[in-house]
Amino acid sequence: MDLILQSLKSKTIQFSIALTVLSMAQGYTGLLPVSQGSQALIGIGIAVCIVVLRSVTTTALNQK
């Protein structure tokens, strides 16, 4: 349980949770009417965010 609570302090984990919630909302409601090209750009943006978050990571989850 402690590892789960420590994990929630991670910006990467927080980003992943937000991405999951938004993806589920999009899947159920079609909240954002986007083209395939826009979906590709969004995917690239997500990948860039993950790389940036990983590059600023300085400690392991069990040390948070």
Image (tube, helix red, strand yellow):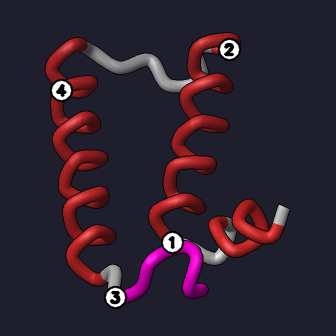
Residue type at tag 2: Thr
- Residue at 18 percent of width and 35 percent of height: 41
- Marked residue nearer the N-terminal end (1 or 4): 1
Q: Secondary structure at mark 4?
A: helix
- Residue at 52 percent of width and 42 percent of height: 19
Q: Are marks 1 and 3 in contact (CB under 8 Å)?
A: no
Quarter where residue 38 is shown: top left
Q: CA distance from mark 1 to mark 4?
A: 23 Å
Residue type at tag 1: Lys
- Residue tagged by mark 4? 40
Quarter where residue 31 is shown: top right
- Residue tagged by mark 3? 58
Q: CA distance from mark 2 to mark 1?
A: 27 Å
Q: Any mark on residue 29, and which?
A: 2
Residue type at tag 3: Thr
Q: Position of residue 53 (x, y in %)?
A: 32, 70
- Residue tagged by mark 1? 11
- Marked residue nearer the N-terminal end (3 or 2): 2
Q: Position of residue 55 (x, y in %)?
A: 21, 76
| In this view, the mark in front (2 or 1) | 1
- Residue at 25 percent of width and 34 percent of height: 43
Q: CA distance from mark 3 to mark 4?
A: 30 Å
Q: CA distance from mark 2 to mark 4?
A: 20 Å
Above or below — where is 3 with respect to 39?
below
Left-right relation of 47 to 59: left
Residue type at tag 4: Ala
